[in-house]
């Protein structure tokens, strides 16, 4: 006997999880993200406080201080680990919010069309043509510095592009027969959007989330580097801000900025890997072509001509 | 017809997968003689297109030709070097592709597209190329002015002729046609075929014609090969196959072709002995009109898709609406199911003056009473949901069944449309089923609410020929068993003749003729109806070529 629930779960979740785990790129990417997440949450209680003044400023890396000390004599290792907390939290939150707002506004505009679409499209277009970076700088310097401000600024300047993409995707789905069939059977519009259409957009939503997260982390670090965040907190952005304030390049103390920079690059790299993975999971053609390349001997492959296996000659 | 120009022996094509390769074509052997029209018939997935693409070696990854021999004009294709093959394509053999309507580049004029081929393969440019392009257009009977047209300015039939003209550009002795007429209307299709036959006579071409439509090939091919699951199950002359063939699959294919003329075949679809129709119609449509306005504030382009249509449908009746693409028949389906709002007119359901046409929101009761079966079974089911979800949602929505009753009701319903065992099918996903099975699920969904009327918009046109009649039989049986009312919308007059009691012929958004099915077939009044009937009956080709 079947029950509605487990059949449903088998459909989306299982397919996705097995797809992600089975895909090498997505798996490696997820591991890196997981590593940073876990270390940011669990390691800080066991190490030096990142704000304590411990020792001589600008000590190079040693066994006592893995990444050395910075211009104030604070432990760079502790700052790198603890800095991940707020940076990743704000980055991923902004990513989620951007996707939710984009899906909501873009989805409604695309699904309903007509007058509603006209108004929402106007809103989207206004936000798209506003120059993002100056707006971000102005808002961040004008509002009181806090993680909440950063989050708000990032979401406000980042949601429009996403809404635009989701809107056009929604417009193609709206005219599909399965949506018409749901309308004819009397389903409500909200239910059609959430249960019938949104799951079909899962790969788009997931890669939008990843794109938005990369953007948010980068922009957030950039703003903080310019001193537009709360400089009293420890984040990857403020780490770089203090490194530059203490003339890290002139004093040749590379260890004050390299670890943080490397971590930012690694996070973006991991997210990009996951994005590639999602692409392969949701687009089976890429996989079958890869398989084919692996299995067919290389000397047989020429562009545009079907190979003939000479095994039986 | 002495020596074979194409000789294929034991051709086998594999599709590489993670596990064992899938054999898309298995041990296919046939010969084609000079000047012959050789037909390759098969349903979707039978491997017919794969054979041809393997012959030309244009199969994309993940294909691999694993065995066999292909000899075309004494040249062994499978052992030739890459540069040999590139020179060989188009000069010796050219191909008219399946989606020929999309084969033309939308941003290049016809002239440029023809000259492109001439330049690449014959190094013909300037005045010579122009002259040749004009010759080619004359060959397919298209006006020379059209040389500077762009594809979007041409009709489907014209595009198809131009694609054929391009294939003929450097006069290859062999032409492969892969479903060249599938996207066209019947009447246009017949004209194109007549043109091809004419060209073959003039130029002495050898043609390999691939189609799913056996009926079409029976008219003009010399020999036929019938493919199923990657193998040729029967290869014989047209006369022998027309007589019924030897293989049971051939027999099934031949038996499933309805004809729009002549005496009615017995036993093709079940019909009630007599029709007892009530006086008052269950659905009445009065002066319905739909005008599509192009988007944009300054855009004044209007398209009248449906113009002043009125008809009635009685309880227990099957009414066919027949028309070609652009006749507005799908718009009628969408209007009746209220997927779109009529610009003018009235829809009355069940005689109760329930004027659903005017309101923006459709009453839930109307959604329960009017159901629809869509053309494309791949598109009308949501690929992420199970069959159970598709069938249970409408029932939950209209509060017809509770959780306990649901499963047994759905299993019962699935078995009614021929999906046994029902519990197995209930937990399947759309991609785990064949096209025919999906369409049965879609029909079950429409029937689940016990609607007053079902609108079936081309329910069989995307299905394989051999199962079309079986799917239509579901409607025929349900009508007898539970007095189902159906509005059957189709381009195929022959199937409408067998399923429907009454036929309405639609052209350019207006009703041009309406009569009982057999009366309409035997005595058509309008010229257009006569044309339609002729195009769907055997023997049309001889009329056209004479």
Image: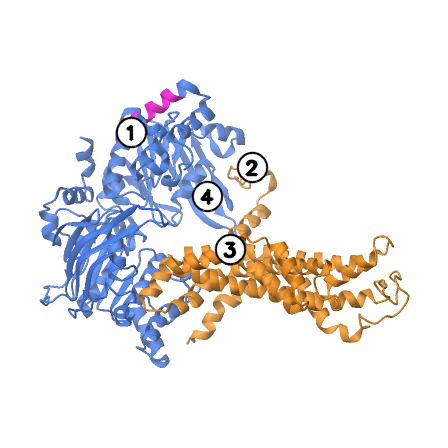
The disc at residue B12 is: 4
Q: Residues within 10 Å of mark 1 (few under 14, many from 20)?
A: some
The answer to whether tags 3 and 1 share a subunit is no
Instruction: Report the span colored magenta.
Output: B130-139
- Image coords of residue B401 (percent x, y): 32, 78
Which of the two discs, 4 and 3, sits closer to the camera? Answer: 3
Pointer 1 with pointer 4, Cβ within 8 A: no
- Badge 1 sits on which subunit? B
Q: How many marks?
A: 4
Q: CA distance from mark 2 to mark 3?
A: 49 Å
Q: Residues within 10 Å of mark 2 (few under 14, many from 20)?
A: few
**Does residue A191 belong to the magenta stretch?**
no
Residue A189 or residue B32, whichever sits in front: A189
Pointer 3 with pointer 1, Cβ within 8 A: no
Identify residue for label 2: A302
Identify residue for label 3: A126
Which of the two discs, 2 and 4, sits closer to the camera? Answer: 2
Image quadrant holding the N terminus of chain A, namely: bottom left
Which residue lies most toward the top here? B127
Q: CA distance from mark 1 to mark 4?
A: 40 Å
The answer to whether tags 1 and 4 share a subunit is yes
Q: Secondary structure at mark 1?
A: loop
Q: Colour of chain B?
A: blue
Pointer 2 with pointer 4, Cβ within 8 A: no
- Badge 2 sits on which subunit? A
- Image coords of residue B249 (percent x, y): 30, 51
């Amino acid at each position: 006997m079947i029950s509605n629930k487990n059949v449903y779960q088998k459909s989306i979740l299982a397919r996705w999880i097995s797809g992600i785990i089975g895909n090498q790129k997505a798996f490696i990417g997820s591991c890196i993200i997981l590593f940073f997440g876990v270390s940011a949450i669990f390691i800080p209680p066991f190490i030096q406080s990142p704000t304590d003044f411990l020792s001589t400023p600008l000590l190079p890396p040693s066994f006592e201080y893995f990444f050395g000390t910075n211009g104030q004599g604070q432990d760079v290792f502790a700052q790198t680990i603890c800095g991940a907390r707020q940076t990743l939290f704000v980055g991923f939150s902004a990513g989620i919010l951007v996707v939710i707002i984009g899906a909501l506004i873009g989805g409604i505009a695309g699904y309903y069309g007509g007058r509603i679409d006209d108004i929402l499209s106007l809103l989207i277009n206004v936000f798209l043509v506003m120059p993002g970076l100056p707006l971000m700088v102005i808002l961040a310097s004008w509002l009181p510095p806090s993680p909440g401000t950063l989050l708000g600024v990032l979401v406000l300047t980042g949601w429009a592009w996403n809404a635009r993409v989701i809107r056009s995707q929604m417009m193609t789905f709206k005219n599909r027969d399965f949506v018409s069939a749901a309308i004819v059977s009397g389903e409500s519009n909200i239910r059609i959007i959430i249960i019938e259409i949104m799951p079909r957009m899962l790969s788009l939503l997931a890669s939008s989330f990843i794109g938005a997260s990369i953007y948010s982390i980068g922009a957030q670090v950039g703003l903080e580097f310019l001193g537009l965040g709360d400089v009293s907190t420890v984040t990857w952005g403020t780490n770089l801000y203090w490194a530059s304030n203490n003339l890290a390049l002139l004093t040749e103390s590379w260890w004050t900025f390299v670890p943080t920079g490397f971590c930012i690059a690694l996070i973006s790299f991991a997210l990009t890997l996951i994005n590639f993975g999602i692409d392969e999971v949701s687009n089976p053609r890429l996989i079958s072509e890869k398989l084919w390349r692996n299995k067919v001997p290389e000397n047989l492959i020429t562009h545009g001509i079907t190979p003939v296996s000479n095994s039986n000659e | 017809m002495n020596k074979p120009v194409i000789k294929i022996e034991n051709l086998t094509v594999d599709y590489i997968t993670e596990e064992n390769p899938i054999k898309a074509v298995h041990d296919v052997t046939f010969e084609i003689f000079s000047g012959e029209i050789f037909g390759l018939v098969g349903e979707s997935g039978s491997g017919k297109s794969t054979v041809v693409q393997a012959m030309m070696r244009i199969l994309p990854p993940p294909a691999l030709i694993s065995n066999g021999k292909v000899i075309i004009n004494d040249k062994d294709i499978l052992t030739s070097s890459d540069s040999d093959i590139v020179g060989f394509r188009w000069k010796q053999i050219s191909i008219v592709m399946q989606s020929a309507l999309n084969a033309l580049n939308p941003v290049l004029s016809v002239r440029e597209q023809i000259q492109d081929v001439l330049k690449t393969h014959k190094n013909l440019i300037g005045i010579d190329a122009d002259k040749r392009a004009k010759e080619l257009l004359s060959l397919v009977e298209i006006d020379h002015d059209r040389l500077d047209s762009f594809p979007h300015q041409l009709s489907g039939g014209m595009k198809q002729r131009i694609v054929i003209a391009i294939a003929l550009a450097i006069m290859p002795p062999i032409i492969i046609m892969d479903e060249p007429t599938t996207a066209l209307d019947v009447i246009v299709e017949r004209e194109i075929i007549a043109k091809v036959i004419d060209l073959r006579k003039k130029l002495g071409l050898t043609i390999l014609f691939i189609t799913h439509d056996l009926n079409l090939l029976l008219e003009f091919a010399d020999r036929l090969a019938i493919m199923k699951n990657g193998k040729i199950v029967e290869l014989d002359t047209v006369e022998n196959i027309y007589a019924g063939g030897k293989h049971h699959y051939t027999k099934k294919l031949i038996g499933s072709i309805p004809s729009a003329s002549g005496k009615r075949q017995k036993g093709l679809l079940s019909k009630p002995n007599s029709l007892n129709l009530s006086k008052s119609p269950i659905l009445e449509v009065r002066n319905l009109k739909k005008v599509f306005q192009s988007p944009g504030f300054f855009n004044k382009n209007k398209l009248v898709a449906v113009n002043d249509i009125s008809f009635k449908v009685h309880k227990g009746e099957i009414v066919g609406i027949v028309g070609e693409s652009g006749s507005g028949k799908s718009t009628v389906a969408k209007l009746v199911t209220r997927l779109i709002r009529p610009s003018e007119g009235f829809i009355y359901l069940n005689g109760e003056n329930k004027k659903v046409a005017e309101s923006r929101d459709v009453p839930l009761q109307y959604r329960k009473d009017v159901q629809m079966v869509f053309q494309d079974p791949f598109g009308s089911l949501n690929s992420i949901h199970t069959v159970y979800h598709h069938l249970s949602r409408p029932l939950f929505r209209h509060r017809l069944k509770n959780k306990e009753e649901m499963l047994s009701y759905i299993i019962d319903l699935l078995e009614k449309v021929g999906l046994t065992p029902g519990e197995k099918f209930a937990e399947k996903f759309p991609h785990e089923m064949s096209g025919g099975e999906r369409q049965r699920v879609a029909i079950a969904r429409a029937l689940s609410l016990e609607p007053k009327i079902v609108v079936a918009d081309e329910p069989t046109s995307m299905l394989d020929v051999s199962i079309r009649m079986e799917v239509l039989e579901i409607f025929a049986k349900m009508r007898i068993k539970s007095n189902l009312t159906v509005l059957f919308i189709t381009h195929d007059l022959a199937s409408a003749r067998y399923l429907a009691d009454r036929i309405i012929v639609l052209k350019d958004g207006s009703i041009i003729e309406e009569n009982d099915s057999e009366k309409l077939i035997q005595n058509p009044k309008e010229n257009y109806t006569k044309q339609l009937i002729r195009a769907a009956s055997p023997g049309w080709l001889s009329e056209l070529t004479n």
